Image (cartoon, helix red, strand yellow):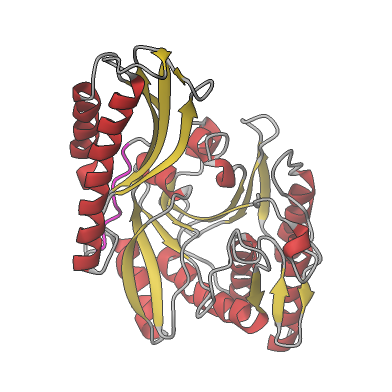
Amino acid sequence: MDLSSKELDTIAVENFRRYLRIPSVHPDIDYEPCVEFLETQAKDIGLQFRVFRDVPKNPMVVLTWPGKERSLPSVMLNSHMDVVPVFEENWTHRPFDADIDEKGDIYARGAQDTKSTGIQYLEAIRRLKIQGVRPRRTVHVTFVPDEELGGGEGVMKYVETDNFKGLKVGFAIDEGRSGNGKTLVVQYGEKRNWKFAVHCPGKSGHGSLLLKNTPGEKLRAILNKLYAFRAEQKAKEDREKSGDHVTTVNLTIMRGGVQGNVIPEEFVLVFDLRIPVEDYDSVEGRVKEWCKSAGEGVWIEDILKDGDSPNTATDESNVFWVAFNEASKKMGYEIQLIIARGNTDGRFLRSVGIPTFGFGAKQDTPIRAHADDEFLNVDVFLQGIQIYKEIIIAVANA
């Protein structure tokens, strides 16, 4: 069926809004409405459709565009189905209605993070198929669960399954930050996340006494060391005007105490560190030494500790980078390479040796992911489809 550009745009926007209206929101998500919606998309576009259910209640949906040379490693285009909770009273539009205002802004949870990305992949492929294009490599468009909870019950587990390994993925594109003007932002790596609790046990007693070996003394020692290190890292960020090679340190939780006149038997401090991969071993070693020197009995409880996730090469050794970069240049864009501050499912893909770029085709868009009144402009959404169209076929033919 021949469709005009305007008709294709109408289909794309309507599919985007239909997807946004599915409230796949934490907690207690039911992913099945997303699965059903994506199955209709696969039939409409002419893609193969599978659902992996290796993780109970957390399906992974795969829509496949077969390539001409199926023995080659495939390309994976990844996005997640889940979205974060909303505080509806703070929104000017209902968060799952996908309303469009007079400026063409579509308001809904997931408009930026990251339902737009999944639909842009599919609509780019729709246009390529209509043009009679067939890729050299097989392309898998994947829709995954649990990313907003850290991916521990999603991609982290799926990459170890036979179903995933059967996709033979050689390169992946995952969600990423939007760029500005004629600059596309590409994340070639992520910091390693280490969340841990420092337990500071000690002598308890009456609040009027100056006892030795109290939890508070050990707490002070830990805070002094970690916040001195934090200040060093902040100064480094200011000097370099970039956070790519800086460790972020934040105290997020403090626990302890029973009442105002009793020295407790323990204080617990929870920290969130995001560490450049090249500095991870050094930073971990320093933290352990600080805890050891803080006093008797201080110990670390790991809450979340990312494994090794090497950065993706951005030179001639990576044919996918070469293709991505050349396609961008042909469209008149330059690329800004960054290390992601936050974490995405891309780190799990890199951890099993899959080169992965984080990329979001949402140019000149104020960041509203996880915020009230999350939105994406219609024209920006459609422009992103054209950008993905060129990049997808470039990397699929690499």
Q: Position of residue 323 (x, y in %)?
A: 35, 70
Residue at image coords 27%, 49%: 230
Asked whether 214 falls inside the magenta stretch, the response is no
- Is 247 rendered above or below residue 126? above
Q: Position of residue 66 (x, y in %)?
A: 56, 56
Farthest-out residue, front = 208
Query: Relative to residue 165, is residue 353 drawn left or right?
Result: left
Residue at image coords 60%, 58%: 370
Quadrant (top left/top right/bottom left/bottom right) for the N terminus: bottom right
Residue at image coords 50%, 25%: 260
Q: Number of numbered discs present? A: 0
Residue at image coords 76%, 41%: 30
Quadrant (top left/top right/bottom left/bottom right) for the C terminus: bottom left
Q: Position of residue 349 (x, y in %)?
A: 42, 45
Majority secondary structure of magenta residues: loop
Q: Position of residue 281 (x, y in %)?
A: 21, 36
Asked whether 313 falls inside the magenta stretch, the response is yes
Q: Which one is in front, 219 or 342?
A: 219
* Quarter of image, res 288: top left
Q: Which one is in front, 147 or 342?
A: 342
Q: Which one is in front, 209 or 216?
A: 209
- Is 152 rendered above or below residue 118? above
* Quarter of image, res 296: top left
* Visible residue check, residue 47: yes
* Visible residue check, residue 304: no
- Is 116 rendered above or below residue 264? below
Specify the segment rendered in magenta. Answer: 308-314
